Image (cartoon, grey):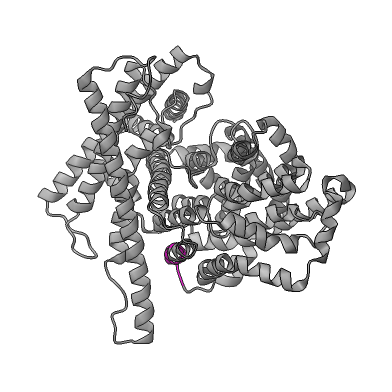
């Protein structure tokens, strides 16, 4: 993950504190990626367990008909996975954007547009993160619980907020990279797969 | 209303053009519109939307099918598809070229993505065809064309997203896509037979020997395909038979894909890591777009935009068929700037009311949209199947496009056919689901 030091002689000098911030943001993105993977694994297990239980109860009617929380909690895990993975996807350049026009610009214009894009991105993700945090705090204070399982709603909401914060932090790092003239996306974080 | 529509378009396209990520662009536009035209506490509304959309139960099939595809993507399925299909493809004029089409159909039935289908089938098939002396244009063209089946033959990520956004049953869409998918594959195969009969030099003379493979060999080749066919039967069969919902079938699919991967001994830490982080990034990418599209769709509905546009288009008095024609052209133009996912999710809030009021079935329209996306998948400048083949062969984009042209024309013809006979898509869901 020492991408910024690997950039070679042509790379602009990065002040040590900034480099530390960039590295920390990358670490956070990778952490988010693994958290998202854990959510996906948990989701798969929950639904599989639900299927097995439901099938077993058809054979032996005395058994419970299914895991009552399976679908609700799977939905929470899915939401968390979407946002936890988002920062890593941003770092890897996996999020889709309209790049047709961007590709036609010269290096300098490109850097300006990338900076503007990151700025707008920070505005949106920052707002998103802040509002999700307030949202989770409110439902914690109000003691809101879900209708199905009486789970305190602040728990899944806090997971979404944490994912959004990671995304916003990665957006700050991206903005810093643009301002410093570093390459904003790093293909080495990308795992080629079935995405589009 | 004019000022709302102008602001919407200006903010949307201005932000898109400056390279802001699609999902974030859509959220940005929605927030700007709300602040400008309604005094609603946006900071309270937005997180509630985010929470509701990202935890929509109907969406659960999406990450699961992505994980399933990621596992299979990293197995030796490419080899198995080629070895299992080759002895059978040899019976038909056009010989092993049919492996491209049949292989794509099979992988499409376990994966929801066109680019992945092209990649998996092409990895082995293209180099084998080259080595055996098939003409490259037809090898490349048939692969690019057949790869588009990935979206049409269920499971399909695009259909799940359409189902969630259009509030339509994903199962119904999955059922509706099956017959068109198989028919389109047959059309491609017929074209390959016609093409290679008119121009026999495309297939090397020596390949005629493939007709004389013994039946025993043919049958034993099928064993290569047995695991993946069993998986297809389990996943599609459980859904069509009414035994499982799409999400349950997807979970079965993930377990099955893991078993196949484990049986091949491909369960190293590196593979698992790639599967995990690959799935995570694909999920996050699609999740962000769906999130943005739903938020903007909700906000546009609050502001009455879809109703206004529907009123405007109705005042034009277009015939239903003309509406579909206009929409197709709009999508082909949009396809030059946007990928299929973004194109569909961005336009759906406006287009869906139009189509519904013109009397089209929303399930039919979903399948129609998938076909349009497939067209954009094989037309430059943004054709993801073309990119994949460029990566596999190193050929130029325009050359690949030229080779793919006949298959694009078949696709266009097929869309016209679907518009004339909607039952091609709709009869199976009616039969199975009532």
Question: Which residue is painted at 69% across and 61% down in the image?
Answer: B85
Position of the C terminus of chain B by quadrant: bottom right
* Residue B421, position as x, y percentages in the image: 71, 57
B176 falls in the magenta region: no
In this view of the protein, which residue sits in the foreground, B381 or A128? B381
Magenta stretch secondary structure, dominant = helix
Q: With respect to residue A103, does B48 lie above or below?
A: below
In this view of the protein, which residue sits in the foreground, A115 or B310? A115
Point out the stretch of residues depicted in magenta.
B244-254
Question: Which residue is painted at 43% across and 45% down in the image?
Answer: B282
Number of numbered markers: 0
B253 falls in the magenta region: yes
Question: Which residue is painted at 38% across and 31% down in the image?
Answer: B29
* Residue A64, position as x, y percentages in the image: 28, 80
Q: Is residue B377 visible?
A: yes
* Residue B201, position as x, y percentages in the image: 87, 45
Left of B14 or right of it: where is A139? left
Position of the N terminus of chain B by quadrant: top left
Q: With respect to residue B330, does B65 lie above or below?
A: below
* Residue A96, position as x, y percentages in the image: 45, 36
Question: Which residue is painted at 64% across and 65% down in the image?
Answer: B427
Q: Quadrant of residue B254?
A: bottom left
Q: Is residue B39 visible?
A: no
Left of A85 or right of it: where is B241? right
Q: With respect to residue B60, does A23 lie above or below?
A: above
Q: Which residue extends farthest top?
A: A108
């Amino acid at each position: 993950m020492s991408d910024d030091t690997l950039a070679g002689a042509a790379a602009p000098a990065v002040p040590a504190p900034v480099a530390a911030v960039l590295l920390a943001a990358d670490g956070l993105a990778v952490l988010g990626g693994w958290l998202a993977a854990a959510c996906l694994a948990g989701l798969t297990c929950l639904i599989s367990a639900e299927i097995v239980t439901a099938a077993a109860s058809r054979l032996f009617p005395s058994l419970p008909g299914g895991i009552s929380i399976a679908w609700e909690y799977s939905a929470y895990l899915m939401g968390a996975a979407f946002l936890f993975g988002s920062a890593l996807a941003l770092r890897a350049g996996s999020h889709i954007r309209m790049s047709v026009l961007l590709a036609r610009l010269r290096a300098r214009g490109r850097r300006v547009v990338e900076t503007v894009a990151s700025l707008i991105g920070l505005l949106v993700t920052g707002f998103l993160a802040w509002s999700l945090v307030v949202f989770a705090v409110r439902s914690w204070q109000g003691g809101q619980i879900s209708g199905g399982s009486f789970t305190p709603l602040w728990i899944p909401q806090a997971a979404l907020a944490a994912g959004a914060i990671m995304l916003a932090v990665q957006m700050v790092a991206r903005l810093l990279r643009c301002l410093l003239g570093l390459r904003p996306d790093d293909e080495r974080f990308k795992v080629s797969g079935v995405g589009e | 209303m004019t000022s709302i529509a102008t602001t919407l378009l200006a903010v949307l396209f201005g932000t898109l053009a400056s390279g802001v990520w699609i999902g974030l662009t859509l959220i940005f536009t929605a927030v700007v519109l709300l602040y400008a035209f309604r005094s609603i506490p946006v900071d309270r509304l937005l997180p509630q939307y985010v929470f509701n959309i990202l935890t929509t139960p109907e969406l659960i099939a999406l990450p699961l099918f992505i994980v399933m595809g990621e596992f299979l993507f990293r197995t030796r399925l490419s080899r198995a598809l080629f070895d299992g299909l080759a002895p059978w493809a040899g019976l038909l004029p056009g010989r092993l070229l049919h492996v491209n089409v049949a292989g794509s159909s099979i992988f499409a039935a376990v994966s929801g993505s066109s680019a992945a289908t092209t990649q998996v089938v092409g990895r082995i098939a293209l180099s084998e065809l080259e080595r055996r002396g098939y003409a490259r244009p037809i090898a490349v063209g048939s692969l690019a064309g057949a790869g588009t089946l990935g979206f049409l033959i269920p499971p399909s990520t695009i259909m799940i997203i359409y189902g969630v956004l259009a509030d339509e049953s994903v199962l119904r869409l999955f059922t509706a896509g099956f017959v068109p998918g198989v028919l389109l594959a047959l059309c491609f195969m017929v074209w390959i037979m016609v093409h290679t009969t008119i121009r026999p030099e495309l297939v090397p003379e020596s390949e005629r020997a493939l007709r004389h493979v013994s039946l025993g060999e043919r049958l034993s080749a099928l064993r290569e395909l047995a695991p993946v066919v069993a998986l297809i039967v389990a996943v599609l069969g459980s859904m069509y038979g009414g035994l499982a919902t799409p999400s349950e079938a997807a979970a079965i699919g993930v377990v099955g894909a893991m078993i196949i991967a484990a049986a091949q001994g491909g369960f190293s830490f590196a593979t698992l890591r790639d599967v995990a982080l690959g799935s995570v990034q694909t999920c996050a990418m699609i999740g962000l777009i769906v999130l943005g599209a739903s938020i903007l769709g909700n906000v546009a509905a609050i502001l009455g935009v879809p109703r206004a546009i529907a009123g405007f288009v109705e005042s034009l008095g277009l015939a239903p068929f003309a509406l579909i024609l206009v929409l197709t052209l709009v999508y082909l133009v949009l396809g030059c700037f946007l990928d299929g996912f973004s194109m569909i999710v961005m336009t759906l809030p406006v287009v869906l009311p139009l189509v519904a009021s013109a009397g089209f079935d929303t399930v039919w329209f979903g399948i129609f949209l998938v076909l349009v996306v497939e067209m954009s998948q094989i037309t430059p400048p943004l054709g993801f199947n073309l990119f994949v083949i460029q990566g596999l062969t190193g050929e130029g984009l325009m050359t690949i496009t030229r080779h793919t042209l006949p298959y694009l024309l078949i696709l266009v013809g097929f869309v016209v056919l679907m518009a004339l006979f909607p039952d091609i898509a709709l009869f199976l869901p009616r039969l199975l689901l009532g």
